[in-house]
Image (spheres, rainbow, N blue to C red):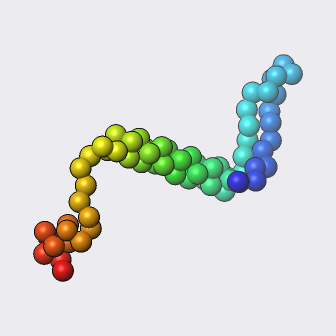
Amino acid sequence: MIALHQNILEKDGKKQFAILPYDEFVKLQKELDDFEDLKALRRAKQQEADAPTIPLQEAAKALELK
């Protein structure tokens, strides 16, 4: 978890904006990007769950790697 040191700006007594130090913003953006990648990977794995597979040794032999 990233510790955030935000400043909240208000207008007419209502919260309008959150201001973050730039380094925290960059860390948060990277975490969000990683999370989006993880969600995409999970979707792809779910879509391919019933796809036929072959053992690694057979694939290596077929590709003449061993």
**Residue situated furthest bottom in the rendering:** 66
Is any atom of residue 13 visible in this view?
Answer: yes
Front residue of 6 and 38: 38
* Number of numbered discs: 0
Screen quadrant of the C terminus: bottom left
Asked whether, in this view, residue 47 is left or right of residue 33, the answer is: left
44 left or right of 29 in image: left
Query: Which residue does the image show at 39% across and 42% down from the upper left?
Result: 46
| Residue closer to the observer: 45 or 6 | 45
Q: Residue furthest right?
A: 13
> In this orientation, which residue lies closer to the viewer: 7 or 43?
43
Residue depicted at x 26% and y 46%: 51
Percent position (x, y) of residue 56? 27, 68
Q: Indicate the position of residue 20 as horizontal and vertical percent values.
A: 72, 46
Q: Quadrant of the N terminus?
A: bottom right
x, y percentage for residue 3?
Answer: 76, 53
Residue at the location (24% across, 71% down)?
A: 57
Residue 47, position in %: x, y? Answer: 34, 40
Asked whether residue 44 appears in the rendered view, the answer is no
Up the image or down, 36 lies above or below 56; here it is above
Q: Is residue 29 left or right of residue 49?
A: right
Q: 32 or 26, which is in the foreground?
A: 32
**Residue appearing at x 80%, y 36% in the figure:** 8
Specify the quadrant of the image occupied by residue 13.
Answer: top right
**Left or right of residue 62, residue 42 in this image:** right
Q: Quick one: which residue is furthest to the top in this view?
A: 12
